[in-house]
Structures are given as C-alpha cells and as structure tokens.
Amino acid sequence: MRYLLFLPLLFLTCSQNSIEKNKRKEPDLKKIELLFEKLQKDEGFKNGQIAFALYDLKNEKSILEKNADKSLVVASCLKVVTTAAAYSILGENYQFTTKLEHSGEIVKGILKGNLYVKGAGDPTLCSKLIRYAPQLEEVFKQWQIKINGFGIKAIEGQIIFDDSEYPTDIMPAEWIWGDMGNYFGSPACAFNIFDNIYQLQLQPADKLDAKPTIIKTIPDVSSQIEFVNELITAEAGSGDLSTINGHVYDKYRYLNGSIPLGNTFKVHGAMPDPAFFLAKNFYEYLKKNKITATKKFSTARLINTKIKEKRKFLHEFKSPFLLKEIINYTNIYSSNLFAEAILKRIGAKKMSKPSTNAGTKSVTDFWREQGIDVKGMVLKDGSGLARSNLITANQLTQILTKSFKKEYFNNFYLSLPLAGSDGTMANTGKNLNNIHRLRAKTGGMSRVFAMTGYFRNADRQMFAFTLIFNNYTCKADELKNKYEEFLKIMVENT
C-alpha cells in the first residue's frame, strides 16, 4: 500500500518538473545576435569595435562568434591567459622563495663576510591584499631567528639584498609613462614589499589653484624619493585627479593634477626600489636587536655586480601562500603585481630568465602547444596593463575551454569573481538569476572594456564566453547598462 501511495506523488513531482521546464524560456541564440547587431549600430560604438565568442563546453564547440578573430585590447582580462598557464607550468602548489646566505666564515659569533638575502620575486611579502600576510616585523623576526641559529652576533661586512637574478630593465618595455609611478604600475621585482605601494599624505592648500603640502609617506620612503610637486588644489568634492609618475629606480617622482580642497588627502604610488627599502629596514631591525653590520647595507644592483664571491647557504624561506592562493587574489582583485610576478617565474621555469619577455614567450608557446592558434595574439606583459597587448575573443574563450578540462579547473574557476558578489564583479550582473553563477574576469582602461568567463544556462550546462569593447565613445554608466543587458540576454538564451 505504501508503494501505491507513492506513485501519485511521483506522478505529481514529474508533472511539476515538466511544468517548470515548460515555463523556462526556450534558448534563442537569435536574440543574442540581434542585440549584438543593435550594439554595433549604437552611436557610442560606431567608431569602435565589439567582439563576442560563446562556447558550449559540454560539446566543446563554438556556438556563436561575432568579430571573434579580431585582435583587440582586453586590459586585465589578460590575467586569465597568464594565470591559467601558470597552473600547468608552475603547478598549483608552487611557492615563491627567499634565501639567506653568507660569504666568509663565522668565527666566535662574528660573520667575517657579507650576509645576503636573495630574492626570487615573492609578491606576497607583507601584502595588504592578503588579509593574513605576515607583517614586516614578523618576517624580519623569522630571518633573525635563523641568523641567531647559526650563532651570528655581529657582521664584519654588509647586509646585501641580492636582486641580481632579475634584470635591471624590470619594467615591461611597453608600459606607458602615464602608468609608471602610479600604484597600479609597479613592476614585479626580485623583492616586493607591501604590494610595492606607498601612501602619500598631502595637505590641500586653503585656496584654489594653490599647491598642496607633502606631509609624509607610509611606509617611510622619503630617503629614496624626491618629489617634484606640481599638484594644485581644486574645488571641494572634485575627487582624486592626481597622478604620480616616475620610473622604477629613479629617485624623482612627478606629482601632477589636482586634489580637492579640505582635509588631509591620501594618494598611492609605486615604490622606487623595494630591495633597497628592505635592506635599509632589515639593517635597522638587526641593529635594534644587537646584531650590527660594520659596512651597513646595499643591494646587488647598487653595488653593480653579480657578486660572485663564494657563499654558504643558511636557509630558504618559502612563501606561506601557494600559487593557487596567489592566483585567487590575482584574479579576484586584479593585481597587476601578482600577475607580473607569476609571469616572470614562468619565464624562469621555462627559459631560465625571470623576465617579462621570457614569460610572455613561454605563455604564448604553452597555449600554442595546447592546440590554440596564437596568430594575432601579442603578449607584452602578464597583467594586461600594456595597451599593445592584443588577443582575440576566440583565443580567450578557447583558453577557458582548454582550462575546463584541466585538473586545476575548480580552483581556476573559483578565482574568477562571481557576478554581483566578488572583487571586480561585485557591482556587475546583479540583474542575473543566481542559477547562472556567472564568473568572469573583467578588464578596463581608457576606451577599453572586456569580460571573459563562465556561466550556466537554465539546465545548468556550462558555457564560456568573451565580450570585448574597444574605442567606444559612450560614458561609463551607459556602457555598463548596455553590457549588463547583453549578459542577461546571453545567459537566458543559451
């Protein structure tokens, strides 16, 4: 009898599922095509280019392409190209390292030689982006404990931060002057600290067009920088219209633009020489803890030599963060520094050169080996900051498709911001039904917006897509309204 009673319930459940399925909108790719054509005719896009690619991941095929083989600028979407390759090339459990070494001999507690700290590009040292990253004092204490463990109580030599593994042309060649010196334009060096960012505190003048006063920098990098202050004070509420320009290793920083009338104002810039900052501060930390160096501190670059003297290994410190965790922060918060640091380690692994050029060549070669036609793909960095980077909507979507079949896919997928919730997608896609779980990396710069990622249709089938706008003339809020509408039509009609 129990089973007979169950049958009507089963029938009702099946009927209900059938009714719900019938209520769903039938997929209609034509609606996506029509909206794309409408966008192309829009006044704001008629002088520019729009590209779109949509792939069915279950059947591994393209289902809709529009200008998908045009090489375009995608800004930070390029981080997908770098980070997806890094999983395979470096491995998801890869850890950046920093080494302690010394020259000479340790005699009765005195190091009769130099103490070396050798950097290999760890971007996470005291990172403000990572909530649980150790503070500078903690990092120095770990280093000091190892030094004490070898009985070193004094150094008859220098404390040298060895940044020689990385080339002195540390800045990607295609980055523009307008980005250099700004907080987002810091290159990945052999040593990176506080995301290579300092805060500059300014006091606006008490009248319009007058020059603000520089108060201080946090952390203190005043010994490394000479500011050329050409800022002016603008009307209250005008916002941050300032720029900080200057090449890495150059002591001059040029302040231009304006800050608003009112209270103390804070802007952010890129550290000029992270290795020197660390050398100075570690020397002072050891001195405070009764370990002195008679010849103070320096860096390999400043000594201008590869420092070929024989060294003895003391200890290797591994980053507390695995590559998969670093990639998560890279994509969720679109960290240029993290992406460039990863790219250079790819170059070191594949070509024994931790350089931008070695990294971009290695990444391009990797995707070619994965079966992607890389004609028209031009990589000039790992983060997308260079405007000379070019890639097609098809290539980006194919990279997502290839990644879908990799063992690392789940971690990679979760590193992409969730629409309406995470990182750079927190304010995008709030009009989408939660069932679609759209995760995507965005990219934007002047006259460029792009998005690439994954979503599910109403039947929970997975798709990959890329949408690119170049050289549009409409305002940012107009563009947002239009691509939000496009995303909604896309997920509902696939």
Image (cartoon, grey):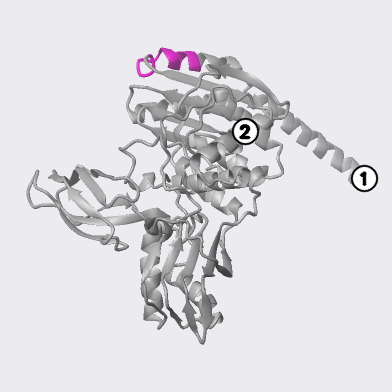
Left/right placement of residue 452 relative to residue 156 reads right
Name the residue carrying label 1: 1
- Identified at 25% across, 49% down, the residue is 253
Instruction: Kindly give the residue lying farthest to the bottom in the view shown.
Output: 108
Residue 462: where, in percent of width, then height? 66, 33
User: Label 2 is placed on what type of residue?
Assistant: Asp
Range of residues picked out in magenta: 36-46
Give the quarter of the figure containing the N terminus: top right
Name the residue carrying label 2: 365
The answer to whether residue 181 shows anywhere in this view is yes
The answer to whether residue 332 shows anywhere in this view is no
Observer-nearest residue: 52 or 166? 166
Does residue 42 belong to the magenta stretch? yes
Left/right placement of residue 228 relative to residue 47 reads left
Instruction: Kindly give the residue lying farthest to the right in the view shown.
Output: 1
Residue 93: where, in percent of width, then height? 65, 54
- Identified at 63% across, 54% down, the residue is 94
Question: Are there few (<14), some (14-19), or many (20+) residues within 10 Å of tag 2?
Answer: few
What SS does tag 1 mark?
loop
Left/right placement of residue 401 relative to residue 186 reads right
User: Label 1 is placed on what type of residue?
Assistant: Met
Observer-nearest residue: 420 or 211? 211
Residue 225: where, in percent of width, then height? 26, 55
Using the numbered discs, state the Cα–Cα distance from disc 1 to disc 2 in whole angstroms.
Answer: 67 Å
Q: Against 439, is 165 above or below?
A: below
Tell me if label 1 and label 2 are in contact, CB under 8 Å.
no
Give the quarter of the figure containing the C terminus: top right
Question: Are there few (<14), some (14-19), or many (20+) residues within 10 Å of tag 1?
Answer: few
- Identified at 90% across, 43% down, the residue is 3
Looking at the rendered structure, which numbered label has been put on residue 368? none
